[in-house]
Image (cartoon, rainbow, N blue to C red):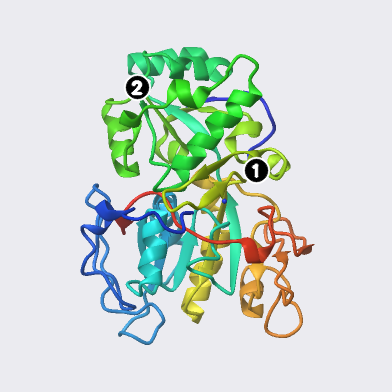
Amino acid sequence: MREQRSGGRSRRDLLRAAGAVGAVGLAGVAGCVGSGGSTGTTDGSGTTGVGNGTDGSGGGGTSTTIAILAAGSLQNALSNGLKPAVDVPVNVEAHGSATVARLIDEGKRDPDIVSVADAALFEDPLSPLWYSVFTSNAVVIAYNPDTEGGKRLAEAGAENWYDALASDDVRIGRTDPDQDPLGYRTLFTLELASRYYDDASNLTEKILQKKQIFPETALISQFESGSIDAAIAYRNMAVERDYEYIELPDQIDLSNPQYDEEWYSTVSYTLPSDQTIQGGLISYGSTIRKMSDAALDVFAAHTTGNYLDEHGFLLRDQFPMYEGDVPQRVQRATGGSAGDGESGSGSGGTQSTGNRSGSNETAGTQSVLGGSPVELSSAVSDITLLI
């Protein structure tokens, strides 16, 4: 895979409510409710999962199956990276973020583990007592080198990609900002790019059209069939599928903590619910809703495993970092030292286990995402799938 770079060093906030968001994804999951195991849905690729009647906590069936409700952008990594690495049966169900939050809030799902694509929205409606920030991502421009538009984009490269996207030569696909984080992060990237480049003003107006919007699963199929030439996507999506892609500067791809508070946060998007989403570092969060030995084993492998890097996610030495009152056993399992008593972070501050770097550091009460823990809320993103 050819990776174009535009400079910068190595790479390294979702929806609280959005009305009918995820309705398409729910079409196949009407029977998958409650805290028991899930009867599958599909992602359009025929991949289906069955919960086998277990509740994921070890007490609802003859075997312990751990249920993970996850961000769609994690589905490939969880299916092909995490599941083979653990001895416990795992069912993974992924939806658009508002759908996941709503399923839990309405009591239609009660998974063992929830993993989301925008940790800054973990407060409402999910409101876990604690969670881990365990990986990041970057916005990239994926393209099909076999189409004329893709060739045009390849020629433009990292220096002039925005000119190619603004032309009529390149057919673009993107996701809906009212439905998932990738959609509004696309807007953030283009707005930041309009400020970053001297010769690129009003890129959102010049590049974006409503006809470009697809559900993520449809976006991928359109891309692979050659119906579109380029897609504004997450880095891991391109890496997992071996897509050609243009890597954007850290200043606009939402991947670098250095630019979080004073640069990424200068852009925002208001959802139909009138909630304003502020730009920020792409940060994935996870928590255990139903603690068990099996769930803890899966969680530890999920949040610290090398498979994340292999699937194109971005890791930092301080990951995993914790928000809230983290159980001591969780910190032990993920390689960190716990604090006094059961909670490893009693003050509710951010705490790094240092699992990947061998260090144990505390960041105080300031969130890794740039806000206090009580300001953080949650969500899940991207596609609809039950593995």
Relative height, residue 239 to residue 52 (above, below)? above
Q: Which mark is residue 171?
A: 2
| Residue 222 pos. (x, y %) | 28, 32
Q: Residue at x 54, y 46 (%)?
A: 313
Disc 2: CA contacts within 10 A as few (<14), some (14-19) or many (>=20): many
Front residue of 105/330: it is: 105
The quarter of the picture where residue 147 lies is top left
Q: Which amino acid does label 1 sit on?
A: Ser
Q: Which mark is drawn over residue 52?
A: none
Task: Report whether 9 appears left or right of 148.
Answer: right
Picture layout, residue 67 above or below residue 195: below
Can residue 213 be seen from the camera position used here? Answer: yes
Identify which residue, 275 or 209, lies in the foreground: 275
Q: Is mark 2 on a helix, strand or loop?
A: loop
SS for tag 1?
Answer: helix
Compared with 8, 367 (above or below) is: below
Q: How crowded is mark 1: few (under 14 residues within 10 Å), some or many (20 or more)?
A: some
Indicate the quadrant where residue 341 lies: bottom right
Q: Please give the residue where the numbered disc 1 appears in the rendered image.
A: 265
Please give left or right for residue 163 compared with residue 342 in the image.
Answer: left
**As drawn, 316 above or below 155:** below
> x and y percent of residue 236 in the render?
48, 42
Kindly identify the residue that appears in the image at 42 percent across and 63 percent down.
101
**Between marks 2 and 1, how big is the CA–CA gap?**
29 Å
Q: Where is residue 359 in the image (x, y as percent from the top left)?
A: 77, 61
